[in-house]
Amino acid sequence: MNTMLAGLAALLLAGDSLAQDISSARYPIPQGELIVTTSQPQAGHFGAPPPFAQLDAGHRGYLTPADANAYPPLANDYIFADSNRDGRLSPREYRRWCTER
């Protein structure tokens, strides 16, 4: 049990250097006090969105979820960028997503 708690504490401390929102909670347990620290990692820096043609690997005139995986922020937002919910991103939807992000 103590080894597991020590490992968890080490993992949490290592993550603190990358964290931006840190919160802690303290809980009394029979062995003493348990401190649980949680955080969110900083957002990655991916640069400007690539041109539509660069992502359109199949040269189909639309982007699929697989195409979007080449640019992680788009892959994350894909269902929101697909405003007509047809499962494809048109050049117009992509331009709108680029300006609204």
Image (cartoon, rainbow, N blue to C red):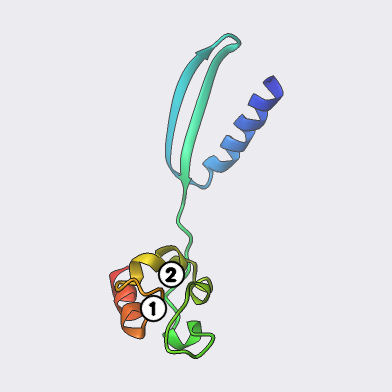
Relative image position of residue 76 (x, y in whole percent): 44, 63
* Residue drawn 67% across the image and 31% down it: 7
* Residue drawn 71% across the image and 24% down it: 3
The N terminus, quarter of image: top right
Q: Are marks 1 and 2 in contact (CB under 8 Å)?
A: yes
In front: 15, or 94? 94
Relative image position of residue 96 (x, y in whole percent): 29, 77
Mark 1 — residue? 89
Quadrant of the image occupied by residue 48:
bottom left
Task: Find residue 74 and name its label.
Answer: 2
Quadrant of the image occupied by residue 63:
bottom left
Relative image position of residue 94 (x, y in whole percent): 36, 78
* Foreground disc of the pair 1, 2: 1
Q: Amino acid at mark 2?
A: Leu
Other residues around mark 2 within 10 Å, as few (<14) / some (14–19) / many (≥20): many
Task: Find residue 50 and name its label.
Answer: none
29 with respect to 75 (left or right): right
44 versus 55 height, above or below: above
At mark 2, the secondary structure is helix
Residue farthest to the top, as pictured: 30
12 versus 35 height, above or below: below
In front: 86, or 63? 86
